[in-house]
Image (cartoon, rainbow, N blue to C red):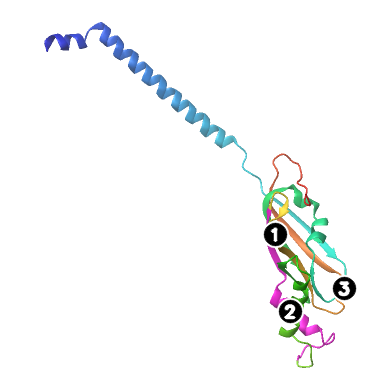
Amino acid sequence: MQSLARARTTPAAAALRHRGTQRCQRNLLHVSTQAAASQQAAATEAPAQTHWFQKTITLPNHKRGCHVVTRKLLAELPELGEYEVGLANLFILHTSASLTINENASPDVPLDLNDALDKLAPEGNHYRHLDEGLDDMPAHVKSSLMGPSLTIPITKGRFALGTWQGIYLNEHRNYGGSRSIIVTIQGQKRPDGRRYGQFS
């Protein structure tokens, strides 16, 4: 036992222990230097910037009924292609027209939707508000039922709509005239500064 204890305290053993301690310290220093560099990079990295954009789009006169206007809106919104991710709010500035999302494939859907609205709010003399004709107050009722605004996600320069979803302008008056829609976009733009193609 005494010889074993002496072997452990020989100069060679002491040197071995010293080299092991130095190696350990170097490893610890390397790890801590890497951690510090990572923290510094995270601190100096610029956070993703949120951009705002707003535009008023005026759609021409549409006859009374429900109309898919997705492509018409996109044609007026080339700026949408700049956004990687975000939200778009569409708000119609009228009380006798409305916006909704529904099927964009069958031409029967807009017709049936308009027929259903006419049944929910039929024309007649049973309203107090008849200032602008028999279609006036029913148009206000339909507008409130359908709503004045939509919020749509943006993904890679497009409205993130489902395959069969389209944006509807619902015109509730016989002669409504042109309709104005404010589009407000909030999101992050493409980091490379380029623009996505919307119809590709």
Task: Point out residue 4 in the picture as x, y percentages from the top left corner.
Answer: 16, 11
| Residue 8 left/right relative to 110 | left
Quadrant of residue 15 within the rendered picture = top left
Q: Which mark is residue 142?
A: 2
Q: Are marks 3 and 2 in contact (CB under 8 Å)?
A: no
Q: CA distance from mark 1 to mark 2?
A: 26 Å
Q: Is residue 65 above or below residue 10?
A: below
Residue type at tag 3: Gly
The residues colored magenta run 127-154
Residue type at tag 2: Lys
Q: Nearer the viewer, residue 22 or 111?
A: 111
The residue under label 1 is 163
Labels 3, 1: front one: 1
| SS at badge 3 | loop
Q: Are marks 1 and 2 in contact (CB under 8 Å)?
A: no
Mark closest to the chain's N terminus, 1 or 2:
2
The residue under label 3 is 177
Q: Is residue 83 above or below residue 140?
A: above
Task: Point out residue 7 in the picture as x, y percentages from the top left corner.
Answer: 19, 9
Q: CA distance from mark 3 to mark 1?
A: 30 Å
Mark closest to the chain's N terminus, 3 or 2:
2
| SS at badge 2 | helix
Q: How many discs appear?
A: 3
Mark closest to the chain's N terminus, 3 or 1:
1
| Residue 64 left/right relative to 26 | right
